């Protein structure tokens, strides 16, 4: 069996609104091993984004635990958590969040600069990643000069620039037309096959969800395995 990358134990998350507790995650327990491709589907409001944010340490749970390679994520010091966010996970969102005044390769190299790599090395990595996502020809373009699919490729390259252990994707094809969405799907599968990239993909896209070997559904803050 391959190495366990991530495990949650009775993960819960509540928000307080107007003195009322809203339980968005309830006892979410699941795990994912190295190289696995996992999809999570579920109705809007089921808690998918909340879960992904916690797995990427962008938010804190109110109960339970997340273990990354066996170590409890939220027992880490803030400095370690920051480097976890920067180096161990890559995040891709529905809206790419690229910086519009920077070129594709400048956007991609940003996490590498934040991690303290020399500019030259960060640049080399950025060009390499843009090549891997099929965008070598567009590295000098700004986001506004790229199509929606190309922008998502840049966002994927940026998420991968430090070779993270885990890629978290939240509705990354949600804003794309069917054909472009399909090309992005192919890219994810290729990245998994070529680099053994472990990924969790939250999606409304049935075809994309079904192409992932391990599948979950979220219903009202709970997670269920789907039959394969
Ligand atoms: N910061 C917040 N404060 C209060 N409620 C929130 C907050 N973030 C999310 N929620 C609520 O949590 C529920 C799940 O949201 P979300 O995780 O975004 O669902 P999904 O991604 O599955 O559509 C929703 O009812 C949403 O309104
Ligand atoms: Mg969401």
Image (spheres, rainbow, N blue to C red):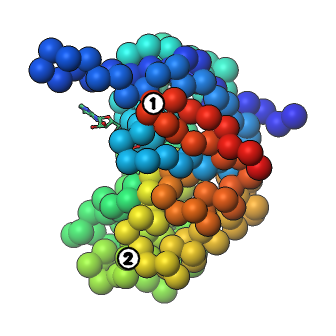
Residue 123 to residue 183: above or below: above
Q: Which is more toward the observer, 108 or 46?
A: 46
Residue 71 to residue 36: above or below: above
Q: Are marks 2 and 1 in contact (CB under 8 Å)?
A: no
- At x 62%, y 35%, the residue is 224
Q: Position of residue 206 (x, y in %)?
A: 57, 62
Q: Is residue 115 visible?
A: no
Q: Is residue 5 left or right of residue 2?
A: left
Q: Position of residue 47 (x, y in %)?
A: 41, 37
Where does the N terminus fall, quadrant-wise?
top right
Q: Is residue 23 visible?
A: yes
- At x 31%, y 74%, the residue is 143
The residue that label 1 is drawn on is 221
Q: Position of residue 64 (x, y in %)?
A: 50, 14
The residue that label 2 is drawn on is 148
Q: Closer to the camera: disc 2 or disc 1?
A: 1
- At x 69%, y 67%, the residue is 190
């Amino acid at each position: 069996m391959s190495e366990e990358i991530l495990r949650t134990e009775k993960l819960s998350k509540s928000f307080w609104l107007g003195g009322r507790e809203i339980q968005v995650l309830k006892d979410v327990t699941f795990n994912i091993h190295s190289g696995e491709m996992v999809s999570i589907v579920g109705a809007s409001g089921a808690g998918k984004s909340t879960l992904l944010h916690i797995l990427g340490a962008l938010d804190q749970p109110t109960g339970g635990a997340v273990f990354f390679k066996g170590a409890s994520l939220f027992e880490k010091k803030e400095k370690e958590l920051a480097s976890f966010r920067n180096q161990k996970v890559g995040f891709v969102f529905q809206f790419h969040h690229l910086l519009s005044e920077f070129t594709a390769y400048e956007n991609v190299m940003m996490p590498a600069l934040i991690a303290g790599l020399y500019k030259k090395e960060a640049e080399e990595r950025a060009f390499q990643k843009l090549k891997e996502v099929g965008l070598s020809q567009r590295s000098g373009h700004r986001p506004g000069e790229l199509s929606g699919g190309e922008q998502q490729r840049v966002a994927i390259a940026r998420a991968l620039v430090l070779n993270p252990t885990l890629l978290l994707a939240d509705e990354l094809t949600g804003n794309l037309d069917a054909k472009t969405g399909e090309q992005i799907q192919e890219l994810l599968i290729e990245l998994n096959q070529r680099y053994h990239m472990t990924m969790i993909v939250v999606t409304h896209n049935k075809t994309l969800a079904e192409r992932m070997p391990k599948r979950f559904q979220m219903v009202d803050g709970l997670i269920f395995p789907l039959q394969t």
